[in-house]
Image (cartoon, helix red, strand yellow):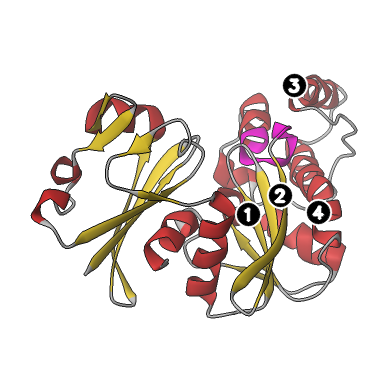
């Protein structure tokens, strides 16, 4: 049996195919382009043209589909089982690390999730989906102001500039002010990375025991990972496939 997992993210749609205990295939798409090019909505249900995606057609049988993500409540995928994002990401982290006891930190495009996993089961969680300042979108926006690619942003952690704005919108003005004062771009980028971590620290403090398993797109940011380790003193494990973790969890379940 082939199991398909789909994460309908706010920025990207991620799809994973799993056969047995192995990931057979993974693909990602821009969310808007995905809905436009590969789906059709009738009566509130999304029909995905799997064969056009280069995936096995579900009409041939043998493929089960589980869906999660930002768009799971707005769009119902035909014939799919729907699960919560936290459940999917916790399962993905368990599958990818082999751990059963840990604290999951998932920083995605528009929200942040922290969950306590005990014995392979999610015990409790908290989520910040009200403010973009602790998400990947904030880093992207600040990188645009600095005219700095995301890959370069993730390399800066030394001498972080002090940033006090608590809003992603007002943060742009503060960064421009720092630039006019002559603050080096690398120090501003380091300040942006640290500001994300500062907003996550109170969430992690709720679950103080066990290693932190880091997933989501921001887990690819080495500076953010460094600051989490530095500010908490905890072991931080970045999953092998941070972006696909939710889709992997869907396939795993």
Q: Residue furthest left?
A: 60
Identify the residue shown where x is 67% and y is 51%.
113
Query: Magenta segment range?
Result: 130-139
Q: Tell whether label 2 touches label 3 (CB within 8 Å).
A: no
Estimate the spatial distance between the alpha carbons at disc 1 and disc 3, rounded to whole Å: 22 Å
Q: Residues within 10 Å of mark 3 (few under 14, many from 20)?
A: some
Foreground label between 2 and 4: 4
Q: Position of residue 70 (x, y in %)?
A: 51, 38
x%, y% of residue 152? 60, 45
Crowd band around label 4 with a 10 angstrom C-alpha radius: few (<14), some (14–19), many (20+): some
Q: Secondary structure at mark 1?
A: strand
Q: Give the label on residue 203, or none.
A: 4
> How much space separates mark 3 and mark 4, taking CA atoms?
22 Å
Query: Crowding near pointer 1: few (<14 within 10 Å), some, many (20+)?
Result: many
Which residue lies at the image location 69% right of the left edge and 61% below the top edge? 115
Alpha-carbon span between mark 2 and mark 1:
21 Å
Magenta segment: does it hold 133?
A: yes
SS for dot 4: helix
- Give me the disc on residue 186: none
- Circle 1 is placed at which residue position? 106
N-terminal label among 3 and 2? 2
């Amino acid at each position: 049996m082939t199991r398909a997992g789909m994460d309908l993210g706010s920025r990207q749609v991620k799809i994973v195919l799993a056969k047995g205990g192995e990931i057979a295939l993974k693909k990602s798409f821009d969310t808007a382009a995905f809905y436009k090019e590969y789906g059709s909505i009738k009566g509130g249900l999304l029909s995905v043209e799997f064969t056009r995606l280069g995936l096995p057609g579900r009409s041939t049988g043998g493929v089960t589909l589980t869906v999660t993500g930002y768009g799971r409540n707005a769009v119902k995928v035909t014939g799919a089982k729907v699960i919560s994002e936290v459940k999917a990401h916790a399962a993905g982290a368990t599958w990818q690390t082999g751990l059963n006891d840990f604290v999951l930190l998932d920083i995605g495009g528009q929200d942040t999730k922290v969950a306590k996993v005990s014995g392979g089961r999610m015990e409790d969680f908290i989520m910040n989906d009200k403010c973009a300042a602790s998400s990947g979108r904030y880093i992207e926006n600040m990188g645009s102001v600095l005219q700095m690619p995301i890959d370069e942003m993730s390399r800066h952690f030394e001498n972080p500039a002090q940033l006090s704005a608590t809003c992603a919108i007002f943060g742009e003005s503060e960064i421009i002010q720092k630039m006019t004062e002559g603050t080096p771009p690398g120090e501003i980028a380091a300040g942006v990375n640290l500001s994300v971590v500062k907003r996550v620290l109170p969430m992690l403090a709720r679950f103080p025991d066990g290693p932190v398993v880091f997933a989501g797109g921001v887990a690819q940011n080495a500076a953010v990972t460094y600051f989490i380790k530095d500010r908490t003193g905890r072991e931080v494990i970045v999953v092998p496939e941070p972006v696909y973790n939710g889709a992997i969890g869907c396939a795993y379940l």
